[in-house]
Image (cartoon, helix red, strand yellow):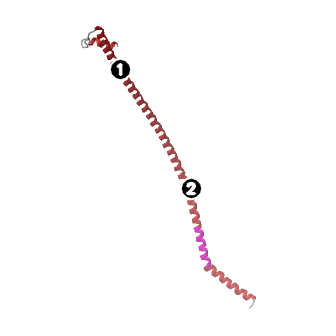
Amino acid sequence: MSINASLLVQMIVFLILVWFTMKFVWPPIVKALDERAAKIRDGLSAADKAKADLASANKKIDEQLALTRTETAKLLSDAEKRAAAIVEEAKKRAEDEGAKIVAAAKADAEQQVTRARETLREQVAALAVKGAEQILQREVNAGVHAELLSRLKTEL
């Protein structure tokens, strides 16, 4: 065999190998590569969509947090105002109650002073009657002289 014949046979075998590879080996490899590329593309698009969804969810969360903070601040402000109003109301009630207690104490003291004066007047009248008795050396009849004794009490 010559170089030309062996080269020609090798070329024919090579062409058969190329044809066989193109017909039976290459299509499954290309199909697997295409499927893998499609999966990668789908995965990337799903990742982009998930990233957009995450950004949207984060934005909604931020809005909800801002709204919640605003509502919380308002509730705290209202609670502080209500607490201040309750404290003021309690102070006013305490002042009113204190004024009532002071007024009652003054009225009670006034009544005690009045009773003490009445008791003192009666004692002075009794002493005056005893003194007059001793001066006159006779007994003064309290029933007979009741009007005189009552006038003496009012004068004292």
Disc 2 or 1, which lies upstream in sequence? 2
- Asked where in the image residue 37 lies, by quadrant, the reply is bottom right
From this view, report whether residue 61 is shown above or below residue 128.
Answer: below
Residue 18 place in picture, x, y as percent: 66, 81
User: Where does the magenta region start and end?
Assistant: 25-39
Magenta stretch contains residue 140: no
Q: Nearer the viewer, residue 41 or 53?
A: 53
Q: In front: mark 2 or mark 1?
A: 1
The residue positioned 72% from the left and 88% from the top of the image is 6
Q: Which residue has dot 1 on it?
A: 116
Q: Residue furthest top?
A: 136
What secondary structure is found at the residue carrying circle 2?
helix
Three-letter residue code for mark 1: Ala
Element type at mark 1? helix
Three-letter code for the amino acid on which mark 2 is drawn: Ala
The quadrant in which the C terminus is found is top left
Instruction: Report the front residue among 110 and 58.
Output: 110
The residue lying toward the viewer, choosing from 34 and 81, is 81
Residue at numbered disc 2 = 55
- Examine the structure image and report whether residue 32 is included in the region drawn in magenta: yes
118 relative to 42, above or below: above
Residue at coordinates 59% horizontally, 66% vertically from top-left? 41
Placement of 129 over or under 38, stated as above or below: above
Relative side of 8 to 54, left or right:
right
Badge 2: residue crowd in 10 Å (few <14, some 14–19, many ≥20):
few
